[in-house]
Amino acid sequence: MANLKVNMSMTKNEMPEQDPVVRATNFDEVALGYDAETAMKEAARCLDCKNSPCRSGCPVAVKIPRFLEKVREGDFDAAYDIITSTNSLPAVCGRVCPQEKQCESKCVRGIKGESVGIGRLERFVADYHMAKEQKDEVKVPESNGHKIAVIGSGPAGLTCAGDLCKLGYDVTIFEAFHKSGGVLVYGIPQFRLPKEIVAAEIANLEAMGVKIVNNAIIGKSITVDELFKDGFEAVFIGSGAGLPQFLHIPGENLLGVYSANELLTRTNLMKAYRDDYDTPIKHFNRVAVVGAGNVAMDAARVAKRLGAEHVFICYRRGRDELPARKEEVEHAESEGIEFQLLNNPTRILAGEDGHVTGIELQRQELGEPDARGRRSPVPVPGSEWVLDVDTVIIAIGTSPNPLIRNTTEGLTFTRKGGIEADEGGRTAREGVFAGGDAVTGSATVILAMGAGKAGAKSIDEYIKSKA
């Protein structure tokens, strides 16, 4: 393919998508991806800046200008090799990483127009590689003789395991669920991240030598202490944050109130939306989703696809303060999700049968910014009103499961139950490292991957220091 000259277009090449009316009734992937010609044109928008500011915004240090150059030239295999030299999950990152707040926010092209579509191009390269009929042979690194245990097969654990495996470590991942992938398989809907993509990324790691033990609940099936007794020289805890948080308002225990975790796990991991699975799931009509992050958008869009006629996002701040990705908000709106902004839930109401009939909301005004710079909501006295719904889904965040905390001595924890660890993932206990949502509470996939990468580097340094 020809090497294209720099493309000075001020806007990104449009991403093909399913029609909103059609996709709101199915679980097929919304974004359809670039073709080769479009990918090359988009990559040609890169100015190949001398200082590569985009790289400073990537938590897993992808060599962005180098892989974009190869895409522009049509050498997609070389682009894949460059990406995967630092990123073990490119097809995942290309779909769910908030590039607009990471690498693309640093792109010079974004000063006077739209940034280069780095995430879209990463997805294209990964998908191109997966679609190849003749797969490249996976190189198995030479063993260095050291055994490492990784707890959790979510983005932090998979990244840590992949980086350690490349360095020659014998890595075993212990996963509590029957399927590997953590939040990538139970938390993110099929229409945003197809599970076949996650399975393929995990298969690449297994082909490289990473071993995965499923149905292994650390703290119950086996403890961290027992892992060390079994010969593991270091342990990385990437067990995520799967414990839902609630509002603590009257009516939260009523029939028809769910956590987003329950809805998404039943739908994503247990395939409740498919007729060939027996997983039961409630069918809704009018749904209130409390929260406005990516998980809230996912829950609302899933409820719509399960047949709800009206789905409302209830959020106490305004549009400018929405924490979800701009793309996810736009997708939700185009699919018919209705937004009740500047409204805070005060109680959930029920009929005589104990089932939800509505949610009382109190109107809010925005006051002074809080510690994070977001304007704090201030209740408007006497402004309570009732939104008629039959279902309420709480999507206000999650915290780490206390099982490891209650069964592992020597670790210290934050007030919210996260493991205390430094930037390199080092905990208070020698040989134990941690990262991702198990440390920070619920955050983004790419930040968890960055923590997994930092943990792998620290483990390598720790093992070498003992030699």
Image (cartoon, rainbow, N blue to C red):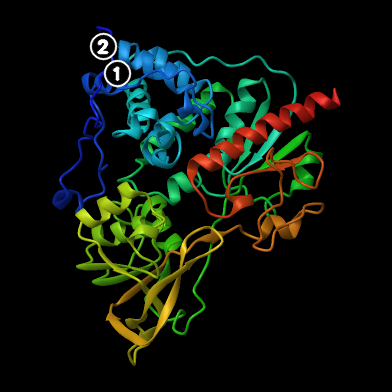
Q: On the image, numbered disc 1 is attached to which residue? A: 44
Residue 132, quarter of the rendered image: top left
Depth check: give the residue in front, 251 or 386: 386
Quadrant where the C terminus is found in the figure: top right
The residue lying furthest to the bottom in this view is 352
Direction from residue 317 to residue 41 in the image, left or right: left
The numbered mark at residue 4 is: 2
On the rendered image, what quadrant is the N terminus found in? top left
Residue 52: horizontal and vertical position, in percent?
Answer: 47, 23
The one nearer the camera, 402 or 338, is: 338
Q: Secondary structure at mark 2?
A: loop
Tell me the crowding category of disc 2: few under 14, some 14 to 19, or many 20 or more residues within 10 angstroms, Cα based: some
Q: Residue furthest right?
A: 466
Q: Who comes first in sequence, dot 2 or dot 1?
A: 2
Q: Helix, strand, or loop for circle 1?
A: loop
Residue at (22% x, 63% y) in the render: 307
What amino acid does circle 1 point to? Ala
